[in-house]
Image (cartoon, grey):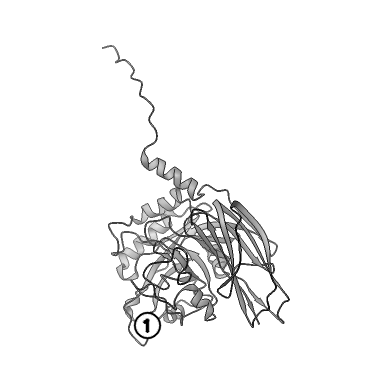
Amino acid sequence: APSPAPMTLMRWRPPSMPEVIVGNLFKQFNELAPRHSITYSGKRLFLFWGQFHEHSDVSICNRRGDLPPEDNYAHERDIARLDFAAVTDHGYNFDPYIWHTMAKIVRSNNDPGRFVTFLGEEWTSDQVRDKSGLGHYGHRNLIFANPRFPRWFNSRDMSKPTDIWAKLRGINFIHIPHQLADTGNCPTDWRYVDEVAQPVAEIFQVRGSYEYEGAPRQAKRTISGHFIQDAWAQGVIIGVIASPDHGGGYGKAGVYAPSLTREAILDAIRQRHTYGTTAAKIVLEMRVNGHLMGEKIKLNAPPKSVKVQVHAIGARDIARVDVCRNNVFIYTRRPNAREVNFIFEDKAPLQSRAYYYVRIIQADEEIAWSSPVWLLP
């Protein structure tokens, strides 16, 4: 046999660009942060990260840019390090075969206790004319607890949100408005509300923020009167999350739940124990007079003061913390530190009702928004 060839020693080379990018994202967005938990009403609640709005190449809107469903789940599980996720393609792109194939993909990617997948769709109501003054009802993501739910809903059948909710009475589902004030597609019609069926709205996605007109990182194509603050001013009780829509990474939902199951996540969302971030895993805990974000407090008489407790841990330094009452920012703290923990006491007289929420802005302009706490007569 011939003599073996001499061994060639290879010079060490730095990681390839994709590996560097992933490593930087892990650091920038705090993707590898340890699990945060709190105690509320005698129960331990864990902070779970996820998203309920992401398209795949099943949707016709961006097939060149969106990943196949399986790759979406791989990205969300292994790169974004989410705990739960849904692929929400447009209802008008489904047929029976595609819907049931998507359901199989949901089930095959579910990893109990580690990564929970949800069956869902985008109910894209921008073709309805009916009697809506807007000419449409807005886009909403429909999320089911049952990964074998037998049917989807096509908004082009002229249905209203209330029609969907009536048909799904008794089913474990949620309906989430997004692109709230968008004009490139259509804004949300805030006349259609339901605290159980529609407990949260998407305050941020890849297009930008829908907090209020003129807000930091506002989406570009918008119309006044349809932002989340506008809904709150109209008396709508609705919390917030964030999700990507396209491309992954932008927009995350933080949910405080007792366990990582489909049922526990949806129950926590219906309690509005939620918040949204632009991308970074910013830990945020906000309480008003001891009540966790999303709660409604029934008042027999106006309190002498209201205490807003804030605890936040940034992925980077936190530049400012804003406390908002009834859409007016009443207090700002500038910690310039990774962690902030304080109680702000609002001694201004209350009106008949009030709602408080908190906004965190990091030095790198990553943002987190809490769901409000409502004080109601």
Q: Which is more toward the observer, 114 or 322? A: 322
Q: Is residue 165 visible?
A: yes
Q: Which residue is mark 1?
A: 134
Amino acid, disc 1: Leu
345 lies above or below 13: below
Task: Name the residue: 58% across, 53% down.
Answer: 336
Task: Name the residue: 41% across, 70% down.
Answer: 179
Residue at the outermost right position? 304
- Label 1 neighbourhood size at 10 Å, few (<14), some (14-19), many (20+)? some
Q: Which is more toward the observer, 58 or 285? A: 285
SS at badge 1: loop
Q: How many marks?
A: 1
122 lies above or below 137: above
Q: What is the x, y in percent for residue 259? A: 58, 58
251 lies above or below 296: above
Quadrant for the N terminus in the image: top left
Displayed quadrant of residue 40: bottom right
Q: Which is more toward the observer, 320 or 24? A: 320
Residue at the outermost left position? 2
Displayed quadrant of residue 214: bottom left
Q: What is the x, y in percent for residue 92? A: 31, 71
Q: What is the x, y in percent for residue 104? A: 38, 59
Q: Which is more toward the observer, 119 or 90? A: 90
Q: Is residue 152 visible?
A: no
Task: Name the residue: 43% across, 66% down.
Answer: 218
Quadrant for the C terminus in the image: bottom right
Q: What is the x, y in percent for residue 304? A: 73, 76
Relative horizontal placement of residue 62, taking residue 240 as reference (left or right): left
